[in-house]
Image: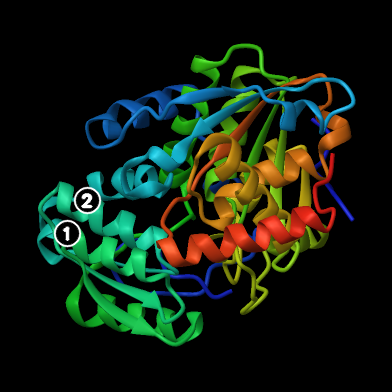
Amino acid sequence: MEPVRVSTAYLPAASGGSLSPRRSSSTVSAVDLIPPSMPDIRAAAWRIAPYTVRTPVHEWRSPAVEARFVRPANLHLKLELFQRTGTFKARGAINNVLALDENARRRGVTAISAGNHAIAAAYAAACVGASAKVVMLATANPARVAAAKHFGAEILTAPDGATGFQMVEEIVRTEGRTFIHPFEGPRVTAATATCGLEFHEQVAGLDAVVVPIGAGGLCSGVATVTKLLDPKCRVYGVEPEATQVMTKSLAAGSAQHIGQVTTIADSLAPPMTTPYVFEMCCRSVDEVVLVSDDEMAAAAAILFAEMKLVVEAAGAASTAGAFGPLRAKLAGKRVGLIVCGTNIDADSHHRLVVRGQQALAAGVLAP
């Protein structure tokens, strides 16, 4: 396979115990970086099935789609926003929590998140009768805080990510809780691969799959299973241009830490990526493209008007990529778009759509 082409740390441990810096991908052993096999992925699908849903796929045909491609693209939307907790995060959290022994479950779990992973960790803990104490950033959308509380989580608030990780480290040290990582490790990648496995079972013969990418948890799994099932199928990651954590990591050849960034797609704005997911993306993602906040807002407005979908900005990233930087490459192709992320309150969604409508009127993502 050709290497990934890029267009235009400190990390908590994966389980209970002390938190520690992770090695760069250049020093992680090859044994640590083995991708999940098809049996691994099918086992994960069987394991998480009682607690997740097989999200539907919709073929998107409309004048708005036809107008944006020189040759009509056949778009299929994998509606992962209808997953338990509103995002794919439930898959990885469940897979990790199910691996805990009884003693670990009695001690409970902890997590840090801008919101979506906190909800998923709380849901996963509730599924096995464990308690969850999660750290959420002060900027978390109120709908996400409410959702985490709904699943029984105790919520602590951190002013920023660095402080939040320190708080999680203290929780692990003093309470013995297991840290549920939002994106790193083979259990997460195997679990997110189940989303891709479903997609390929639901829509045969895809020429390309377009996946939102932040740290790479979702993309690592979808890309891995895609290349196992059909090596010719292209995998495109779509990243906010304000973050570029994966773009910069690919350019550097190792997982990078970028610090705090600002984007409307806060679900795609981690401060770093990590060795395992970075390596999986290196192996199986064909290209990463960048989209602006205005392009994601415009795509969210299109999804609301055309599909009646209420998505957060990150949930519109794949559509923004397809209608923007990937438009020429996807023309005439059979394409799968993963639409994921609906944890947004009504007022915030209204502001997002208004911004998107203004961006469309200014020519953003114009046909």
The answer to whether residue 233 is above or below residue 252 is above
Q: Is residue 184 left or right of residue 367?
A: left
Q: Position of residue 156 (x, y in %)?
A: 28, 80
From this viewpoint, is residue 35 visible?
no
Q: Residue at x 62, y 61 (%)?
A: 354
Residue at 73% of width from left, 27% of height from top?
63
Residue at which label 1 appears: 104
Residue 49 seen in the figure: yes
Q: Name the kind of residue labelled 2 in the image.
A: Leu
Q: Is residue 135 left or right of residue 21?
A: left
Image point (50%, 70%), residue name: 11
- Indicate the secondary structure of the residue bearing disc 2: loop
* Residues at marks 1 and 2 touching, judged by CB atoms closer than 8 Å: yes
Residue 212 in percent (x, y) is at 62, 47
Image vertical order of residue 336 relative to residue 130, above or below:
above
Answer few, some or many: residues within 10 Å of disc 2's Cα (few below 14, many 20 plus, some between 14 and 19). Answer: some
Above or below: residue 341 compared with residue 156: above
Residue 132 screen position, x and y as percent: 20, 65
Circle 1 SS class? helix
Q: Amino acid at mark 1?
A: Ala
Instruction: Name the residue that disc number 2 marks.
Output: 100
